[in-house]
Image (tube, rainbow, N blue to C red):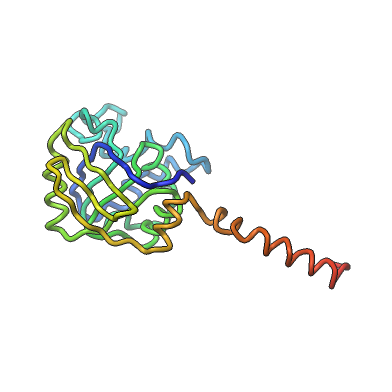
């Protein structure tokens, strides 16, 4: 998993509430188990009409948001099904951080497992960030995970909370497999001990 330490990038704003995982990545994109290529289906029903024509007024079709890495979202983001394709699609598009007043629990957990930092902030702080995100080319935020701070284009800072274990995993790039491999020596010792004690297994 790619490490997350400090991220400076364009922030796009999608101030809609109850954006579910089907809206994030529609069901017709779920035929793959690959984590790549899903970015084109991200928010497909909001980005395109039934004929595949772009909705030019959708934020991700406007410069500079076509290269956004940070998403400012509304309340209860990622609700609905538990599909892990949702964070895969966000990551494949280029998003590394999602900021919202609240997240659905399963989506929130899946973000951490895939190298995306979900940040929960009060609505008044979200409003400030949306104002920053509406500044076009100046809509740049810096996310400092170590300091747990968001810096806006005017130099203002917002503190955020994050679970210490999840923070460490993101900073060190550890997914569930990486965490398991940290105990590789203990696992090897256990297997050797078991092989000696019960060679018939």
Query: Does residue 154 sit above or below 100 in this rendering?
Result: above
Q: How many marks?
A: 0
Percent x, y of residue 169: 45, 55
Quadrant of residue 40 in the image? top left
Residue appearing at x 23%, y 40% in the figure: 11
Of residue 92 and residue 175, the one placed in the foreground of this image is: 175
Percent x, y of residue 116: 38, 49
Residue appearing at x 17%, y 30% in the figure: 137
Percent x, y of residue 64: 22, 29
Query: Does residue 123 sit above or below 66 in this rendering?
Result: below
Residue 86 shows up from this direction: no
Of residue 135 and residue 8, the one placed in the foreground of this image is: 8
Residue 77 shows up from this direction: yes
Residue appearing at x 55%, y 58% in the figure: 179
Q: Residue furthest bottom?
A: 197
Quadrant of residue 54 in the image? top left
| Lateral position of residue 5 relative to residue 74, left or right | right
| Lateral position of residue 147 relative to residue 58, left or right | right
Q: Quadrant of the C terminus?
A: bottom right
| Lateral position of residue 154 relative to residue 2, left or right | left
Percent x, y of residue 119: 28, 55
Residue appearing at x 42%, y 48% in the figure: 115
Of residue 70 and residue 138, the one placed in the foreground of this image is: 138
Of residue 178 and residue 111, the one placed in the foreground of this image is: 178
């Amino acid at each position: 998993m790619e490490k997350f330490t400090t991220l400076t990038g364009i922030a796009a704003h999608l101030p809609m509430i109850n954006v579910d995982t089907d809206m994030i990545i529609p069901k017709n994109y779920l035929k793959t188990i690959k984590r790549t290529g899903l970015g084109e289906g991200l928010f497909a029903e909001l980005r395109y009409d039934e004929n595949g024509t772009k909705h030019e007024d959708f934020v991700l079709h406007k410069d500079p948001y076509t290269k956004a890495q940070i998403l400012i979202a509304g309340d209860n983001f990622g609700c609905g099904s538990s599909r892990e394709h949702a964070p895969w699609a966000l990551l494949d598009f280029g998003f590394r951080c999602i900021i919202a007043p609240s997240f659905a629990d399963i989506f929130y957990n899946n973000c951490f497992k895939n190298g995306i930092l979900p940040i929960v902030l009060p609505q008044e702080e979200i409003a400030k960030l949306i104002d920053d995100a509406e500044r076009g080319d100046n809509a740049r935020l810096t996310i400092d995970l170590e300091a747990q701070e968001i810096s806006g284009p005017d130099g203002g800072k917002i503190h955020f909370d994050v679970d210490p274990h999840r923070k460490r995993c993101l900073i060190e790039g550890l997914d569930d497999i990486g965490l398991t491999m940290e105990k590789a020596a203990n696992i090897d010792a256990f297997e050797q001990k078991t092989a000696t004690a019960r060679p018939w297994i």
